[in-house]
Image (spheres, rainbow, N blue to C red):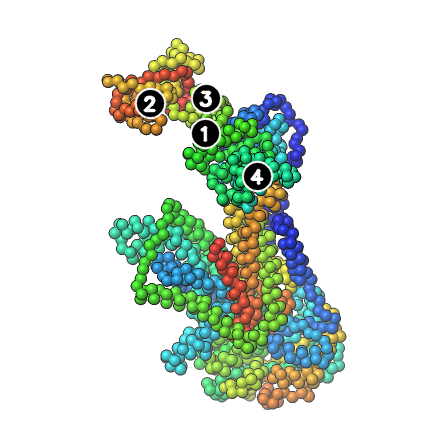
């Protein structure tokens, strides 16, 4: 496999994958993604999170080499693989890919599927690697089955094995759990996570489900309409969202308007420190999560419960504040308040997330 | 080819050999054996083959026969040009032979046998084509349905009283084309047009590709009258002597046109590679032996003066032939075709 | 190997363009010749032959459409909505007429209904010795033959519409108080309309393009006239003009069929499918239904086949089964094999590109290939003839031009199988292969081709069996002495030598049966 020799410019030594202001477009003038920059270290699990159409699959395909890059640069193991002038073909990149529908070769058995990319090895070596993989994914004894004889979960594991057997530089997963039902998906997620950790595989995973992203990823890249809004750990993304979009996407969020005055933000729910250093009088919104709001039923209070949604592990209440502003509160599973109950609303946030009012969506 | 590579070796071998076989069969034209002749014949196989077989029996030369429509063959010869594998061209109609001659396809022959055997009005001036047998385009009628005095002239068939009672050949038939050419030369465009419109209306669906079908239709009583070359009538009678049909020589009255005559003939192609064998065949065909076959087997009028026609036929000297020279049939062809098309004959 | 941004398919694309060119070029030549003809010729044709030909063609198409509408929809409804003993058998039987080429059915019926034939005999027993029934060589004869041969198109399409119709529509109607009869009229039939329309358009296309039946029955349609012009004249101008007209008409119906086929997709509902309840009729009712179906299948397939077998077993017919006969079989096979191979090789790049890279160019190339449907046999032959005599006369009279004409005419049939096979092949499979280190070539070899092979084979077999039956182009273009089975049938049948034609005809029908089985299980519209 040949690669270019130039382009080893200034890449952090430990990053296996790096994107520098990468833009892709299917037709000129309509970019699918713009100015994307992030990197992945060895063994890291990255997640590309966003709604459909945000461009996450495009980026995945660009990393794989299926989509050309219109501007910016893409590096794999420090080598430049994609740029406006140069596109190293997929077959030379050693990326492993698992598609949403797994794309197992229907005309080949499990063992031949897994061994598909190992033509350059001797037969014994190939068989050994296949066995090793089967053991790893827990499907020993399934070598001679055909894909249509396997369940969904088993197919996914075979697809994974096929991708991992060639020790790829980076593993790319396109919505791997969207075809499974929720219980199965939960279990598979755990297994996959363990597997990836064990094999220390650098992974990029695409999903629209933030729970999945939180469960799997070391770092999350949140994308919206082709742009990268935040690239951070799951905790930071949840607690310190960089934009209102991120805030709303990764979890339930309410935006309460307020005004800055003397370093504090005055809102209906109380006062918060001005963490974004605005001038006095600036209109801002405060992001509040349901788990930050505590309800205390109080006769005569001004806020009232509108409805309750039982969620098994918690109750999610929709509460209307005197001004008409709607907020949500997450209470315990057994705390049941009827609609119409007047409650006192207390905010118990450990940190404040503020956005200027013109940025807010709410 | 990639597809082939994905098959196991055995399949690949089979596939390749089949493919090779096919290529050989398809593109390499099969060259006929050294002493054999290829003939393009506008005459139907059934009629010409026996005569040719007799030739092969005496001369030992094999014959490859392609029989098809005369116009088709003419077109084919023109398109093939020098590459044609045909050695001789046999047709039912002098007009087509003349067209072939003027198109430069035929080779003039200088053979005494021809000059002696066939009168000059039945061959091209330079013997590029030679008539072999005479045929008359006449009326066949069903004896139970028609009295012979009801029809005098060919043109009578256009009369509305024969509606749905006649059968005619289709407009591609060279007999029809030649026949109408003679009518035009004799009576002019207007009368001919009338005639054509008349028979078109009268015949309706009874338009046939083959003359034998016309005779059959008359014999079965499906129609009362038909226009065919005479020998079809006698061939039918030879196999079915009880058939209620008879031949009527039209236009024999005083001042009438006379029966429309045409000849079947042969020409040797300029590009032939087997000139000697071809000449042998022509010799055979114009000699008494060959001419007798035309008379006996085909029921035609032999052109050789010393050979008599089949006794069942109307004696040649008992009726008059139309006076249009055969060579003129070619010139007359195009405008006749136009007229036929104008009227819209099928 | 570093590559700059490019589309792999350059050689493939060139191939596809070349293929589309092969198909469109002859058509272009015919059009050019027709349009450059002397206006006098145009005028002459317009005033003399064309009105009659147009009228004949259109009226025949219309009457066949009406008859097949009745036959097709009624049989489809009976099969899907009524409990009939031996239903599976009838389902199969109703498709059998498609195995019979129109010229075979025409020749059988010209015997059955012909002058002095059995039908007349039977009729005369009843109505006296002078009674005549209608001649097969007429408008009604042609209608009968064509309708019997093509109603399965309407039947199949109506049947699939009925089967995929969600019965809840009808249940809703009945729940709203509408009677059974009215439900049929106001709900079921309208829902079937696009499928029926597509079927009728196909039938009309078939009738307009047919040569075999109309030539044997001597019914003057445009297609027949083109043939006659080509064989009876030395210049092809008039033939070109008529051909152009024919192509325009065919195109109209081709587009109509596709449009309705698209519409019918929208009428297919998602949601749980429940099989409709079947009506049960009493003894008498079942008997009536079976008689009706039996009559149709008998007239369209069983009776002709029995006759063919009977004739083939006669002494004269058996005498023809000699070396010469096997020569014809071999000729037919060689031609068909050449055409299918050529067709599949040409069709594959076209279909592949249209599937994988659906740019306007690639899609247009694919659509061009379907133009073959609008080129009836004689027109395809004329087009190829003109093309070759203008460009490469050296090939005149060789098998090659006949194969080209076949490929042009039958490529759509092959594509009908290649397209779905390629569409089923997910692009992900090829991409995965590339992530595993295989280049495009290897991917093709180890992934694409093995998976497409099935569709490949089906397409090949379908084209093979179609070309075995082809008549007009073969008549016009075949090399010296190169006769096929179809030619023999036509030659003998046109001289009314019924028995002599039988062995060839029977062989053709027998060979068509596997094709039919394949077609019905895949996509029968290619028949």
Instruction: Give the x, y percent position of residue A144.
Output: 55, 44
Question: Which tag is nearer the camera, tag 1 or tag 4?
Answer: 4
Residue at the image position 54 percent from the left and 71 percent from the top: C503
Say which residue label 3 marks: A235
Residue B230 appearing in the image: no
Say which residue label 1 marks: A212
Q: Residues within 10 Å of mark 2 (few under 14, many from 20)?
A: many
Say which residue label 2 marks: A331
Q: Residues within 10 Å of mark 3 (few under 14, many from 20)?
A: few
Residue at the image position 56 percent from the left and 84 percent from the top: B239
Pick whichever of labels 4 and 2 is earlier in the sequence.
4
> How much space separates mark 2 and mark 1, taking CA atoms?
23 Å
Looking at the rendered structure, whether the residues under marks 2 and 3 are on a common chain is answered as yes
Protein chain holding label 4: A
> How much space separates mark 2 and mark 3, taking CA atoms?
21 Å
Residue farthest top in this picture: A262
Query: For numbered disc 3, what is the local secondary structure?
Result: helix
Residue at the image position 49 percent from the left and 34 percent from the top: A176
- Residue A114: mark in rendering: 4
Looking at the rendered structure, whether the residues under marks 2 and 1 are on a common chain is answered as yes
With respect to residue A4, does C198 lie above or below? Answer: below
């Amino acid at each position: 496999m040949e690669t270019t020799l130039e382009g080893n410019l200034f890449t952090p030594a430990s990053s296996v994958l790096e994107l520098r202001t990468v833009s892709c477009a299917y037709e000129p003038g309509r970019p699918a993604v713009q100015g994307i920059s992030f990197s992945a270290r060895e063994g890291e699990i990255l997640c590309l999170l966003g709604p459909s159409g945000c461009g996450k699959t495009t980026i995945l395909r660009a990393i794989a080499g299926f989509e050309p890059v219109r501007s910016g640069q893409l590096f794999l193991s420090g080598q430049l693989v994609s740029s406006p002038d140069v596109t190293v073909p997929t077959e030379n990149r050693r990326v492993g890919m698992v598609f949403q529908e797994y794309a197992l070769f229907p005309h080949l058995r499990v063992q031949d599927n897994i061994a598909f990319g190992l033509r350059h090895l001797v037969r014994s070596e190939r068989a050994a690697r296949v066995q090793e993989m089967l053991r790893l994914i827990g499907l020993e004894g399934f070598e001679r089955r055909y894909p249509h004889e396997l369940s969904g979960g088993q197919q996914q594991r075979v697809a994974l094995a096929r991708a991992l057997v060639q020790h790829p530089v980076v593993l790319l997963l396109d919505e791997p759990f969207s075809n499974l039902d929720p219980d199965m998906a939960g279990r598979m997620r755990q297994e996959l996570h363990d597997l990836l950790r064990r094999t220390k595989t650098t992974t990029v995973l695409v999903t629209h489900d933030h729970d999945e992203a939180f469960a799997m990823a070391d770092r999350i890249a949140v994308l919206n309409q082709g742009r990268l809004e935040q690239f951070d750990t799951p905790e930071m993304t949840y607690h310190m969202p960089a934009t209102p979009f991120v805030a709303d996407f990764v979890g339930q969020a309410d935006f309460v308007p307020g005004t800055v005055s003397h370093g504090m933000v005055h809102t209906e729910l109380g006062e918060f420190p001005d963490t974004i250093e605005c001038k006095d009088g600036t209109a801002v919104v405060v992001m509040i999560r349901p788990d930050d709001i505590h309800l205390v039923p109080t006769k005569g209070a001004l806020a009232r419960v509108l409805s309750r949604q039982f969620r098994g592990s918690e109750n999610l209440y929709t509460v209307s504040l005197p001004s008409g502003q709607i907020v949500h509160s997450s209470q315990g599973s057994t705390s049941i308040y009827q609609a119409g109950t007047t409650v006192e609303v207390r905010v118990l946030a450990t940190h404040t997330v503020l956005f200027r009012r013109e940025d807010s969506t709410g | 080819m990639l597809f082939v590579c994905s098959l196991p070796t055995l399949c690949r071998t089979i596939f390749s050999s089949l493919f090779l076989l096919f290529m050989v069969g398809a593109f390499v034209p099969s060259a006929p054996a050294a002493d054999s002749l290829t003939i393009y014949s506008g005459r139907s196989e059934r009629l010409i083959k026996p005569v040719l077989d007799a030739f092969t029996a005496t001369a030992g030369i094999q014959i490859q026969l392609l029989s098809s429509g005369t116009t088709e063959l003419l077109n084919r010869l023109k398109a093939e040009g020098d590459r044609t594998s045909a050695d001789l061209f046999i047709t039912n109609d002098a007009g087509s032979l003349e067209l072939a001659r003027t198109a430069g396809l035929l080779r003039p022959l200088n053979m005494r046998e021809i000059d002696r055997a066939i009168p000059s009005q039945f061959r091209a001036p330079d013997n590029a084509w030679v008539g072999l047998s005479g045929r008359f385009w006449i009326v066949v009628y069903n004896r139970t349905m028609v009295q012979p005095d009801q029809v005098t002239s060919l043109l009578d068939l256009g009369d509305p009283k024969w509606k749905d009672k006649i059968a005619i050949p289709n407009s591609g038939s060279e007999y029809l084309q030649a026949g109408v050419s003679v009518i035009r030369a004799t009576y002019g465009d207007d009368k001919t047009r009338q005639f054509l419109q008349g028979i078109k209306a009268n015949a309706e669906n009874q338009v046939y590709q083959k003359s034998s079908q016309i005779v059959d239709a008359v014999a079965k009583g499906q129609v009362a009258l038909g226009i065919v070359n005479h020998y079809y009538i006698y061939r039918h009678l030879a196999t079915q002597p009880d058939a209620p049909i008879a031949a009527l020589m039209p236009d024999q009255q005083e001042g009438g046109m006379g029966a429309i005559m045409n000849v079947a003939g042969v020409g040797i192609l300029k590009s032939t590679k087997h000139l000697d064998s071809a000449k042998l065949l022509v010799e055979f065909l114009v000699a008494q032996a060959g001419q007798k076959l035309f008379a006996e087997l085909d029921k035609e009028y032999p052109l050789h003066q010393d050979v008599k026609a089949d006794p069942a036929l109307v004696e040649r000297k008992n009726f008059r032939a139309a006076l249009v020279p055969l060579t003129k049939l070619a010139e007359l062809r195009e405008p006749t075709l136009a007229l036929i098309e104008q009227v819209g004959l099928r | 190997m570093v590559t700059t941004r490019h589309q792999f398919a350059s050689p493939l694309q060139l191939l596809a363009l070349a293929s589309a060119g092969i198909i469109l070029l002859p058509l272009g030549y015919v059009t050019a010749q027709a349009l450059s003809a002397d206006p006098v010729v145009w005028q002459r044709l317009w005033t003399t032959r064309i009105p009659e030909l147009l009228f004949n063609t259109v009226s025949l198409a219309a009457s066949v459409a009406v008859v097949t509408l009745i036959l097709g929809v009624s049989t489809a409804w009976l099969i899907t909505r009524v409990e009939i003993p031996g239903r599976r058998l009838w389902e199969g039987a109703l498709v059998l007429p498609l195995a019979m080429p129109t010229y075979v059915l025409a020749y059988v019926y010209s015997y059955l209904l012909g002058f002095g034939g059995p039908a007349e005999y039977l009729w005369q027993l009843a109505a006296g010795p002078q009674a005549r029934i209608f001649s097969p060589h007429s408008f009604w004869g042609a209608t009968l033959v064509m309708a019997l041969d093509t109603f399965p198109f309407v039947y199949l399409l109506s049947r699939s519409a009925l089967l995929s119709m969600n019965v809840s529509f009808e249940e809703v109607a009945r729940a709203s108080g509408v009677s059974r009869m009215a439900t049929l009229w106001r709900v079921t039939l309208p829902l079937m309309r696009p499928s029926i329309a597509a079927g009728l358009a196909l039938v009309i296309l078939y009738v307009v393009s047919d040569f075999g039946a109309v030539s044997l029955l001597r019914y003057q349609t445009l297609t027949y006239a083109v043939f006659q012009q080509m064989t009876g004249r030395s210049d092809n101008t008039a033939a070109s003009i008529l051909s152009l007209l024919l192509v325009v008409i065919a195109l109209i119906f081709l587009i109509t069929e596709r449009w309705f086929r698209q519409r019918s997709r929208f009428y297919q509902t998602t949601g749980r499918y429940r099989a409709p309840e079947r009506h049960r009729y009493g003894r008498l009712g079942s008997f009536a239904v079976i008689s009706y179906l039996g009559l149709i299948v008998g007239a369209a397939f069983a009776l002709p086949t029995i006759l063919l077998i009977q004739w083939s077993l006669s002494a004269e017919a058996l005498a023809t089964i000699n070396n010469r006969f096997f020569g014809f079989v071999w000729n037919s096979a060689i031609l068909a094999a050449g055409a299918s191979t050529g067709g599949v090789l040409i069709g594959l790049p076209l279909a592949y590109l249209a599937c994988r890279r659906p740019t306007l160019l690639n899609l247009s190339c694919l659509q061009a290939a379907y133009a073959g449907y609008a080129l009836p046999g004689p027109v395809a032959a004329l087009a190829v003839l003109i093309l070759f005599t203008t460009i490469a006369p050296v090939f005149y009279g060789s098998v090659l031009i006949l194969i080209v004409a076949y490929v042009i005419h039958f490529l759509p049939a092959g594509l009908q199988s290649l397209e779905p096979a390629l569409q089923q092949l997910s692009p992900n499979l090829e991409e995965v292969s590339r992530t595993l280190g295989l280049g495009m070539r290897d991917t093709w070899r180890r992934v694409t081709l093995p998976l497409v092979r099935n569709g490949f084979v089906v397409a090949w077999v379908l084209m093979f069996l179609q070309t075995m039956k082809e008549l007009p182009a073969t008549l016009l273009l075949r090399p010296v002495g190169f006769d096929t089975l179809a030619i023999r049938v036509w030659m003998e049948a046109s001289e009314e030598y019924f028995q002599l034609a039988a062995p060839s005809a029977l062989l053709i029908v027998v060979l068509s049966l596997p094709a039919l089985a394949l077609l019905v299980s895949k996509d029968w519209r290619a028949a």
